[in-house]
Amino acid sequence: MKLGSLKSRTSRDGQLAVFDRDLTRLLEVRESVGTLQATLENWDRTAPDLAAIYESLNRDHAMGRPFDWSELAAPLPRAYQWLDGSAYLSHVERVRNARGATMPPSFLEDPLMYQGGSDSFLGARDPIVVQDEAWGIDFEAEVAVITDDVPMGLLADRAAGHIRLLVLVNDISLRNLIPTELAKGFGFLNGKPSSAFSPVAVTPDEMGDRWDGTRLHGQLKVYWNEDLFGTADAGADMHFSFAELISHGAKTRRLQAGTIIGSGTVSNRDLKQGFSCIVEKRVVEIAEKGEAVTAFMRFGDTLRIDMLDRQGRSVFGAIEQTVEPCR
């Protein structure tokens, strides 16, 4: 099924809605659980009823109502936990090589992961608002999972059973602020503003054979200013599975229902697939040409991130954003 959240004046967690498979209609759900967060906290009880609504929406085209994409918040407008991994080692290698750093052998066994701000996420049509172009505005196209309650110390071979929903992410980065922050040895803050999410989150069964239980396969299409920038396959070169990322995140703590765990920038070793972020293209240019040719985003630039099913339909709805100055 496909679930999302409408923007709400009365709840910062939005209003839960069920969407039809073609993403043309929605039905608001106010009874018993009014938010996606509450749904995740009571998944075993709520999911069957929502699945029944979803099937009815797909059968009865008079059910529900049309909607405008701008009505939608992120599926989880805020979350108790946002953990972003870096599961694609081709991305890690390229970025580290650009600053003269090799990849330690431990990176093959121990995932990179950071804890990001999750008190406020952007909807798929919300603008990327930045104070200064000189901060190096970049997008990062990712896939992510949303979990139910995960116990501390859970091993990877049991973690997949806690995945409830899949989403797309634009993990926005301000590249020129990040080096100074990392040099302090205390992680990201200003270099990682609020991330944006696809209009809807989908249950893994919606993906058919593209979901293998721990990885999502399929091209993540990225358009920058309407030009195709990348078509990396999300499953092809994902070194750490979502099960491994969940287990890593839960090593010393319980993860509460509604925890979002990102894959990190989707990246393929085959350069013909393009890129899912600007910085990776820049480091390849440095390696091949001696300098970066591609500039970071500027005010007025547009971005589109999407994934299509085998019939050419958008699975999650597209993330479509414009870069705007802070006013």
Image: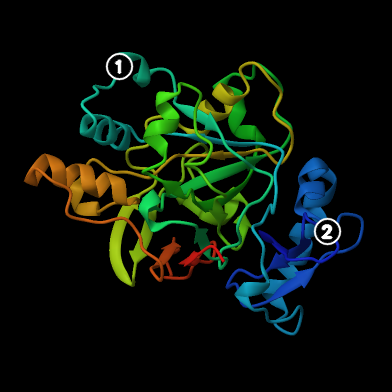
Q: Position of residue 322 (x, y in %)?
A: 46, 68
Q: Which residue is most to the right?
A: 32
**How far apart are the two marked residues, 2 and 1, measured between alpha carbons?**
45 Å
Q: Is residue 248 visible?
A: yes
Residue underneath mark 1: 104
Residue underneath mark 2: 11
Q: Which is more toward the observer, 198 or 210?
A: 198
- Under mark 2, the amino acid is Ser
Q: Which residue is most to the left?
A: 289
Residue 93 appears left or right of 150: left
Q: Position of residue 288 (x, y in %)?
A: 9, 44
Q: Which is more toward the observer, 314 or 190?
A: 190
- Marks 2/1 in contact by CB < 8 Å: the verdict is no
Task: Residue at 77%, 72% (x, y): give it.
Answer: 27
Q: Earlier in the sequence, mark 2 or mark 1?
A: 2
Task: Residue at 51%, 51% (x, y): give it.
Answer: 169
Rendered view: 132 above or below 144: below
Mark 2, other Cα within 10 Å: few <14 / some 14–19 / many ≥20: few
Q: Which is more toward the observer, 84 or 306?
A: 84
Task: Residue at 36%, 43% (x, y): give it.
Answer: 176
Residue 58 appears left or right of 283: right
Residue 318 appears left or right of 220: right
Q: Which is more toward the observer, 38 or 202?
A: 38
Q: Position of residue 164 (x, y in %)?
A: 66, 44
Q: Position of residue 36 (x, y in %)?
A: 76, 53
> What element does badge 1 sit on?
loop
